[in-house]
């Protein structure tokens, strides 16, 4: 009776929350008993039970009531995963259906993790197969692939940085997924810098620093996302530094991500900045048109399987790739909204429907960068006066930023060269042309200048 009840409730949940969420969070649960208005569920880890309670607790109660059960609250008991005998051909064992975090918890028990996983759950969508590779992220993808092979690499750490929605977290999740498949004997820990800080503070408060050190220094691969969040946190930085050194000394792999390069993270201790820079530092550049279109085409294939009745007119994806340039998350969100809207109203996905459905996103993407804004940003970046930017001074400390501003004005605005020259103190268009060419030459030879220009471009387009 209980199995039938849970089967009915969980199937209804699957339809509402989607197959990925169901496989990761609901499928590992078992209904143990129903009594006195409470339902007791078995979970493979305390972490998973707590997460389900926070995110799906009310929905589980609602579906149990819909299945005819009088229940007012849920309880969770931690129960070890039972590995079924080797399945017959064509069937899947229960262990192989368990989420990666549950399996990782079993392996981590020997390292003192018990059933309280310190890491973050992995998104099942973020794999190498779903990552679209293009010129802006080619190096980052290749480096992530090398780490995911599970063998010792020549660079440690791998440091990935870039703006919002460029694929840093996707690559980190993909590395963890691949390692857990290729090298299941390895202990792979992925978490955010904020989670590391939280664990550290809790260990201090509960006087469990020995356990904390043993836990984090016994992993084979440590992956820390958004490391910029520990900047300015002196005690957390101290512990992170010692953890980093201990793992490197043991030849264990470290993968770090941030929204900017190590040298640009303010309030980060110099010794940590130095250690982060000693590995491979890779910048994920904003997606160009070709990459944006490739991402849309791959996503559209997925949505077509979900909405087989919908027709997608030619030119829609190209239109979106051209108009939405802010970041990949906005681009993917726009396409998802478009397919969902077309399904609800029962219409073909055309350019007209896209413009109607995505008015707010398209309007936000139409923000025009002005020459004056470029001049102000460049002047602030190089700490010069705005009046010098358009003035007659030709000393290098002013001339170089002026040329950078001219280069950005040419590439980020629709202004003609003569018009740009007029806005730089009435200069001739040949002066602007010379300045643009000079910056292009220097960027090929000077990595610092190339980083400065890219940083300014992202700030202006963001």
Image (cartoon, helix red, strand yellow):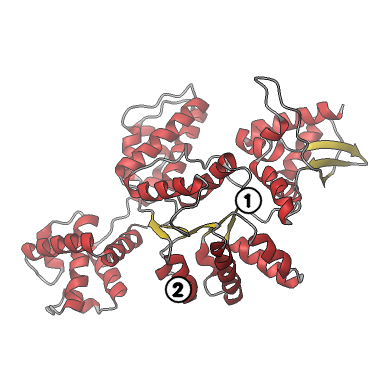
In the picture shown, does residue 189 fall above or below 131? Answer: below
* Residue 268 in view (yes/no): no
Drawn side of residue 67 relative to residue 158, left or right? right
Q: Quadrant of the C terminus?
A: bottom left
Which of the 4 quarters of the picture holds residue 441? bottom left
Please tell me the numbered disc located at residue 187.
1
Most foreground residue, 313 or 341: 313
Circle 2 residue: 266
Which of the 4 quarters of the picture holds residue 378? bottom left
Drawn side of residue 312 relative to residue 74, left or right? left
Drawn side of residue 398 relative to residue 355, left or right? left
Please tell me which residue is depicted at 50% across the width and 28% down the height of the picture.
343
- Tell me where residue 349 appears, x and y as whole percent: 40, 29
Please tell me which residue is depicted at 41% across the width and 24% down the height of the picture.
311
Most foreground residue, 396 or 210: 210
- Tell me where residue 273 appears, x and y as whole percent: 46, 71
In the picture shown, does residue 57 fall above or below 298? Answer: below
Helix, strand or loop status at disc 1:
loop
Please tell me which residue is depicted at 18% across the width and 67% down the height of the picture.
403
């Amino acid at each position: 009776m209980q199995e039938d009840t849970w089967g009915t409730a969980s199937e209804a949940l699957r339809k509402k929350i989607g197959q990925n969420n169901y496989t990761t969070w609901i499928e590992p649960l078992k209904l143990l008993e129903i009594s006195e208005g409470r339902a007791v569920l078995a979970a493979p880890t305390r972490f998973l039970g707590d997460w389900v309670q926070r995110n799906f607790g009310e929905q589980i109660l609602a579906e149990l009531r819909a299945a005819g059960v009088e229940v007012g609250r849920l309880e969770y008991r931690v129960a070890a995963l039972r590995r079924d005998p080797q399945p017959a051909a064509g069937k899947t064992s229960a262990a192989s259906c368990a989420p990666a975090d549950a399996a990782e918890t079993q392996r981590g028990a020997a390292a003192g993790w018990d059933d309280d996983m310190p890491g973050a759950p992995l998104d099942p969508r973020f794999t190498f197969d779903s990552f679209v590779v293009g010129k802006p992220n080619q190096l980052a993808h290749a480096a992530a692939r090398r780490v995911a092979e599970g063998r010792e690499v020549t660079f440690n750490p791998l440091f990935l940085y870039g703006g919002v929605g460029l694929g840093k977290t996707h690559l980190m999740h993909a590395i963890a997924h691949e390692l857990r498949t290729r090298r299941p004997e390895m202990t792979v820990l992925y978490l955010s810098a904020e989670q590391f800080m939280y664990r550290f503070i809790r260990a201090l408060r509960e006087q469990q620093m020995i356990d904390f050190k043993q836990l984090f220094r016994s992993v084979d691969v440590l992956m820390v996302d958004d490391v910029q969040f520990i900047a300015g946190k002196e005690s957390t930085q101290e512990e992170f530094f010692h953890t980093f050194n201990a793992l490197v000394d043991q030849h264990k792999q470290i993968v770090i991500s941030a929204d900017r390069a190590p040298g640009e993270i303010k309030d980060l201790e110099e010794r940590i900045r130095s250690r982060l820079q000693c590995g491979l530092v890779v910048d994920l550049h904003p997606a160009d048109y070709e990459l944006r279109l490739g991402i849309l085409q791959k996503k559209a294939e997925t949505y077509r399987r979900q909405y087989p009745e919908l027709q997608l007119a030619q030119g829609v994806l190209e239109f979106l790739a051209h108009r939405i340039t802010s970041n990949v998350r906005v681009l993917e969100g726009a396409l998802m909204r478009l397919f969902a809207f077309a399904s609800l109203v029962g219409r073909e996905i055309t350019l007209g429907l896209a413009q109607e459905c995505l008015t707010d996103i398209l309007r936000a993407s139409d923000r025009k960068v002005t020459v004056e804004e470029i001049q102000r940003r460049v002047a602030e970046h190089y700490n010069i006066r705005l009046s010098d930017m358009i003035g007659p001074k030709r000393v290098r400390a002013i001339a170089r930023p002026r040329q950078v501003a001219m280069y950005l004005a040419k590439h980020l605005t629709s202004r003609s060269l003569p018009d740009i020259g007029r806005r730089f103190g009435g200069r001739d268009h040949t002066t602007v042309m010379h300045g643009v060419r000079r910056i292009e030459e220097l960027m090929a030879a000077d990595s610092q200048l190339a980083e400065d220009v890219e940083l300014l471009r992202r700030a202006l387009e963001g």
